[in-house]
Image (cartoon, rainbow, N blue to C red):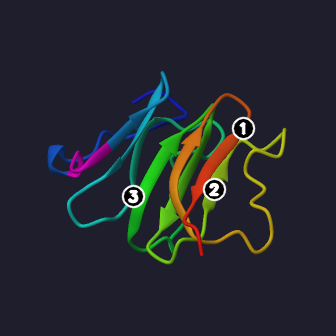
Amino acid sequence: MPRGWSSLPNPSHCGRQCAECGEWDVSVPRDDSVVCWGWNDSGQCTVPNSMGEVVATSAGFEHTVAIPTDGTVRCWGFNDFGQCVVPKGLARATEVSAGGMHTVVSLRSR
């Protein structure tokens, strides 16, 4: 496998949600975990150990975003433009979309 790539997961990991960003992919399998594979030059495929179950994910330009079941937002990978800096106190997230150098979330009303 070329340097900088993570391995392709077991096909059962491609469960209820998948997002791709050119050279790498992120998936939420049936067990609600997060699985990433492909180009990992900026750590976008290195899922934090403490992630737990998630309700949504998205793939941006060399960064990954996930919403755990508690409605917070977790982001990892390339962060030169602040796309992985989650605003303090951000909660109640229901949907997420990561783009080139940005991340957008939808929030549940109170």
Q: Residue at x 34, y 64 (%)?
A: 33
Viewer-side label of 3, 1: 1
* Contact flag, marks 3 and 2 (Cβ < 8 Å): no
Disc 2 residue type?
Cys
Crowding at mark 2 (Cα within 10 Å: few <14, some 14-19, many 20+):
many
Asked if residue 40 lies left or right of residue 6, the reply is right
| 19 relative to 45, above or below | above
The answer to which quarter of the image holds residue 78 is top right
In the image, is residue 33 part of the stretch drawn in magenta?
no
Disc 1 residue type?
His
Query: Which disc, if any, is residue 75?
Result: 2
| Disc on the earlier residue, 3 or 1 | 3
| Disc on the earlier residue, 3 or 2 | 3
Q: Residue at x 63, y 32 (%)?
A: 99
> Magenta region: which residues?
13-17
The answer to which quarter of the image holds residue 24 is top left
Pick out the residue farthest to the front.
110
Helix, strand or loop at label 2? It is strand
Q: Residue at x 30, y 46 (%)?
A: 17
Disc 3 residue type?
Val
Helix, strand or loop at label 3? It is loop
Asked if residue 82 lies left or right of residue 68, the reply is right
Q: Which residue is mark 3?
A: 34
Q: Which residue is mark 1?
A: 102
User: For the N terminus, which image quadrant?
Assistant: top left
Image location of residue 100, percent across then percent down:
67, 28
Viewer-side label of 1, 2: 1
Crowding at mark 3 (Cα within 10 Å: few <14, some 14-19, many 20+):
many
User: For the C terminus, which image quadrant?
Assistant: bottom right
Query: Which disc, if any, is residue 73?
Result: none
The answer to which quarter of the image holds residue 44 is top right
Asked if residue 14 lies left or right of residue 94, the reply is left
